[in-house]
Structures are given as C-alpha cells and as structure tokens.
Amino acid sequence: MGSNRMNERVDVQLDALTGLRAAQPRPEPAPADLSGDGKTFYLETFGCQMNVHDSEKVAGVLLGRGYQQVETIDAAKLVLYNTCSIREKAAQKIYSRLGAYRKYAGEEKIIGVLGCVAQQEGEEIFERSPWVRLVCGSASYSKLPDLVAELEAGNRRVMGLDKDTDATFETEITRRDNPFRAYLTIIEGCDKACSYCVVPFTRGPERSRASALVLAEVRRLADAGYSEVQLLGQTVNSYSDPSSKKMTFAELLVAVAAVHGIRRVRFTTSHPRDFGRDIVEAIDSVPQLCDHVHLPVQSGSTRILREMLRTYTREEYLEKIAMIREARRPISVTSDIIVGFPGETEEDVEETLSLLDAAQYDGVFAFQYSPRPNTSAQHMPDAIPEEEKGRRLARVMDRQREIQRARNEALVGQTFEVLVDGASRREGQWSGRCSSNRILNFTSPRENLLGEYVPVRVSSSSPNCLVGEHAI
Ligand code: SAM
Ligand code: SF4
C-alpha cells in the first residue's frame, strides 16, 4: 500500500481477493442457530490499525458471550468481515469477497459485515448480498453486543448504523492478537473535514475516552505483561479528555509512560494542526515515549492543501517538522502523501517532491487519490487520469526511497535497543523494532529472544530496513 512498512498498515490479503465475483441469484438466508454449544466465529480484517484493534475488541465481545474463535470459515457459525472503505478499490473488493461467502448461505452460517463499508453502504449490503445477516458500522460498535444477542434470539437480519453515537467502543474483554504491542484507542471518529476523506462519515464524530479509563486499561495491559502500548486515533493528538481532569494529550502520554511496567509508548496518527511543542517536549524528557511521530502532510503544495481542507500551509507544516528536528534526541518522522488529487498540476507534484527533500522523512505511505462517496472532493473537476496518478506515485516513491537509503546509511555503526518480535526460520536470525519504529533484522548467538529488549549494532542498511548484530 505505501512505499514502505515503517508503520504497520495492514491491508490484509486484499490482493488475494481480486477476481472473486458477487453472484446474481439472491436466495433467502437459511435459518441459523446460535444458541447452545458450538458457538464459533471466524473474523477477517481489512484496513488500518484502528480496524485491527476494532477486530480485537469485537473478538473480545464474542469471547465474553461464550464464543470460540476459529481459524477457518468452514469451522465457524458466525463469519465476520471487518471492512475498510478508505479507497475505492478496498471497498469494491469487499463485495467480491461477499460473493465468495454466498456459497455458505445455506449452511446455517451467519455472515456479518462490520466496519467502514458497513457504515457507508448500510442496507445496500443486504440488497446486494442477501445472505448477509448482520451489518454493523464502525461508528456503532457499542451496539454490537445487543446485535449479537438479537442474532442469538433468532432474528434474521440485524443492523447497527447509528451515526450520532456518543459512546466509545468499550469492552470488558479485548482479545489482543499482537503479543508484543497492545493497541489502545483513546479517541474515535474524526471532526476534521478533509475533502477527500470518508472517515468522518464512516466513523462518526470525535469521541475521546476519559483519561482515567485509558490509564486503567494501560495498567491492566502492563499487569498482563505488555511493555509496549500504541495509542490510536484518526487524529490521536486531537485528544480532548472528557473528564474533569482535562488532561492534554501530552500529559496523557507522560502519564501512560509512567505506568509501572510500560517501556514503550507509541501513538498514531497525529494531525499537523494539533501537533504542538508540548508533545515534542514530552518525547524529549520521557525515554519511554518512542522517538517516532507519524505526521501526514498529504501534499507539498499549499494550493492543494487548501483544496484538501487540511487547515495548514506547506510552510506551517515545515515549521512543525523543524520543531521536531530541534528536539534533543533524534525523532523519526513518517508521513502519508496523496498524489493525483483533482486539479493537481506538474508544479504541485514538484512541490510535493521538494517537500520530501525538506522534511527528510524516515518513511512514507503514498496513495493515488481515490474519489469517495459523500466527500466534497468527489465531484471536483480536473480529475487526473489513473495512469498519470500511477506515474506520480512512482516519482514520489522513487524520491523517498533515495532519501531513506541515505538516512538509513547514516545509522550504520550505531546501536539501538530493539524489541524482538520475529524469528527467522534460519537459526540465529531475529527481527524487531527500534523505538523509532525502524525494522532491524539481526543475528544473535542467544536463544529465546522473542519479546526481549536487546541492543543491536547496525552493520548495513537498505531503504526499508536495517541489518545488524546483537551487541552483547
Ligand atoms: N487521520 C489521518 C490523517 O489525518 O492523516 C489519516 C487517516 S486515513 C485512514 C490514512 C491515509 O489514507 C490518509 O492519511 C491519506 O493519505 C489516505 N487517504 C484518505 N482518503 C484517501 C482517498 N480518498 N484517496 C487516497 N488516499 C486517501
Ligand atoms: Fe480523514 Fe482528515 Fe480526519 Fe484524517 S483528519 S481521518 S484524513 S478527515
């Protein structure tokens, strides 16, 4: 999806889904029985970290109701599909996937669609894929336990699509899939109105969780053995504590980092408008706060930024970058870029390329603009042809690759602390992430390193990763 994987954006198996066709005849769904034993579910996730974490919470809701998670559709009574609609391709492929599920319609399985496509398409999903029995949008997850209860009571079709929800998605149990990093949503929805973006429509208005609830969850995570947490929100730094404590985002970061047992705190995604000096000062003074900021710019052209309703100019954005670069410890910065926004000229593209030079990012996710329903950019004139978007994307990625090549080369010889999260099949080969979120593959004579923090000396580099040796 992006030009590298510094941040885990997970478009799970999207490509594998191409070519699946939605079938035409529309059979009535067969009765499904969710009572009694054998309550099993299969859950597949598409999209960003927010979706991955939503799925963890959905799994928690179901486990709390006595369900068992299974690895295959065949073994499941309830088949759930957590969807992403940020770009058109992702949304289209979901209908293809639903076409593939049709063959299960007569097998007493309940098929459900969750997430952003569910929120966006609503009843249309029942129309196009009548074998679907549950539709629950990403702004309505707090209703999910009730919806599941309705299914269990034998209701044929249930739907949760509230848009005005004040509630955040709180669960008693969250089934966390990543053994090394715990995700934690602190703010849901988005109140910005970027002209290209579907998120405010699919995830609803901004709702922050009370700081005490966030801290209580972090304590539980630390007690459960997690040492790294990642705070999530579409605009995580727009966090606004609804409780009387009125903690700022920077104060919350410091408080989370102070929880006993927590060694690393990450946060994503930050919106440039709300990114203040206090966040940099917090990172500078609290070692547990990771030295990485994901600060999407979207375009290097002030004219395009205005059309995108991003609320900052190129110069204002670069001032934020300068502020980050002035920190006492180096802070890695990554970004998102959209190419081919309507009306984008050759000069605008040049401005984006020169912004890459000026910002010196450590990683970039670059995307071709995709018109989305309900957004104000959807019908803007001067659409850029797909082929040209592809060329612009390649130019951005090529330039960024060279920047990363040079930046990573400069790290050779340095030693970083790595949280080991992967073992290669080859003996003695490990991988993990630095505080800066860079991936470091390394060799070590030691065994059983998974989950350990170890010092690694960088011996060579490529644009997307570092290679090194355990510095024993
Ligand atoms: N809230 C984050 C922010 O403001 O940067 C980003 C959330 S969005 C899930 C992740 C990225 O998808 C955006 O930063 C943007 O680059 C990209 N994106 C969003 N809408 C898009 C669209 N219509 N076409 C192409 N890329 C899009
Ligand atoms: Fe979308 Fe803009 Fe909100 Fe990010 S800040 S989720 S890009 S509307």
Image: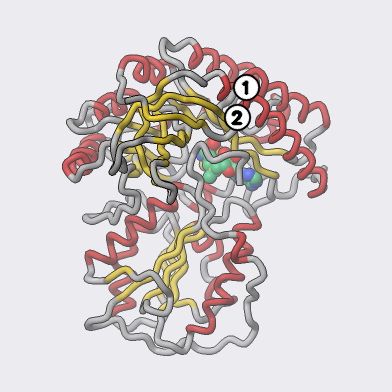
Q: What number is the disc on residue 89?
A: none
Helix, strand or loop for disc 2: loop
Residue 193 in sight? no
Q: In the shown orientation, is residue 267 left or right of residue 406?
A: left
The one of 440 and 239 positioned closer to us in this rendering: 440
Q: In the shown orientation, is residue 114 left or right of residue 19?
A: left
The residue indicated by pointer 1 is 406
Q: Position of residue 266 (x, y in %)?
A: 37, 33
Residue 69 in sight? yes
Q: What's under tag 1, amino acid-wise?
A: Ala
Q: Position of residue 301 (x, y in %)?
A: 71, 26
The one of 260 and 347 positioned closer to us in this rendering: 260
For image coordinates 31% across by 43% down, the residue present is: 450
Q: Earlier in the sequence, mark 2 or mark 1?
A: 2
Quadrant position of residue 44: bottom left
Q: What number is the disc on residue 297?
A: 2
Number of labelled discs?
Answer: 2
Mark 2 and mark 1: Cα distance apart in space: 21 Å
Q: What's under tag 2, amino acid-wise?
A: Val
